[in-house]
Amino acid sequence: MSFTVAIDGPAAAGKGTISRAVAERFGLAHLDTGLLYRATGAKVLDGMKPLAAAEALRAEDLKRDDLRTGDVARAASQVAAIPEVRAALVTFQRAFAQRQGGAVLDGRDIGTVICPEAQVKLFVTASDNVRADRRYREMKGSGMDVTPEGVLADLRERDVRDSGRLAAPLKPAEDAVMLDTSQMSIEDAVAKAIEIISAARR
Ligand code: CDP
Ligand code: CDP
């Protein structure tokens, strides 16, 4: 049986940071599933239809330079509300989760839909303002033309769409451990996640 860690939560809660750190700590493969939706959204901005874009995804699409922009994030959240798009991406994600040696997947529906059998499920949150501030610093730091207000508005719009959609909405699995990182440093959040995963591996 493979060992799977599911990490879900709203935008900029710290899912990716925690996932990368625990993957390294426990020697697990890591898949940032948001990249699949971002790459699909980017192709739609290029002019493709959403389902065709999802079905045509290739590994190199996940390495595009523009995947972290606000426009692509919005397009990702729009295509992610389409059930057929989500269905087209399921097989790849489940196969990744079954890897020998185990895997960490982070996204919105990993614990609820993609890997309901995951041995560990974390739902990472932080207040709107903390998350927007983190994302603003991150985007500003990579040279993007953003304002704190704009980032907060975009993040809220995306969270409302992601939580309100019918297809695999953002919500904690019933057996998820909640991790509110509003008052936590990255080191504290990672240490807490490692503690939870270590307990499950025993
Ligand atoms: O993957 P997700 O969108 O949930 O968040 P992330 O990309 O891991 O984190 C967003 C930003 O917040 C990054 O710049 C992290 O370095 C930062 N962060 C933080 O300041 N404190 C934490 N406890 C977690 C993340
Ligand atoms: O890093 P951040 O949390 O801001 O976003 P992301 O994880 O890269 O995801 C971008 C968008 O893809 C989200 O706003 C969701 O609409 C969608 N997504 C999803 O629906 N299901 C997933 N498993 C992962 C992402």
Image (cartoon, rainbow, N blue to C red):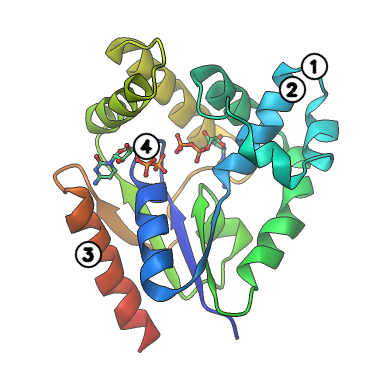
Q: Which residue is mark 2?
A: 44
Q: Is residue 31 above or below residue 71?
A: below
Label 4–label 2 contact, CB within 8 A? no
Using a 10 Å C-alpha cutoff, classify the residue at mark 2 as few (fewer than 14 neighbours), some (14 to 19) or many (20 or more). many
Q: Are the two marked residues, 1 and 4, in contact with CB atoms closer than 8 angstroms? A: no
Mark 4 beta carbon near ligand 1 (under 8 Å): yes
Question: Toward which corner of the image does residue 11 lie, by quadrant?
Answer: top left
**CB under 8 Å between discs 3 and 4:** no
Along the line of sight, the residue nearer the viewer: 174 or 48: 48
How many numbered discs sit on the rendered protein? Answer: 4
Alpha carbon separation for disc pair 2 and 3: 38 Å
Q: For mark 2, give the secondary structure.
A: helix
Looking at the rendered structure, the kind of residue marked 2 is Val
Mark 1 and mark 2: Cα distance apart in space: 5 Å
Q: Which residue is mark 4?
A: 12
Answer whether labels 1 and 2 touch (C-beta < 8 Å).
Answer: yes
Secondary structure, mark 4, is loop
How many other residues sit within 10 Å of disc 3, few (<14), some (14-19) or many (≥20)?
some
Quadrant in the picture for residue 47: top right
Image quadrant for the C terminus?
A: bottom left
Q: Which mark is residue 47?
A: 1
Q: Residue 191, which numbered label?
A: 3
Q: Position of residue 156 (x, y in %)?
A: 39, 24
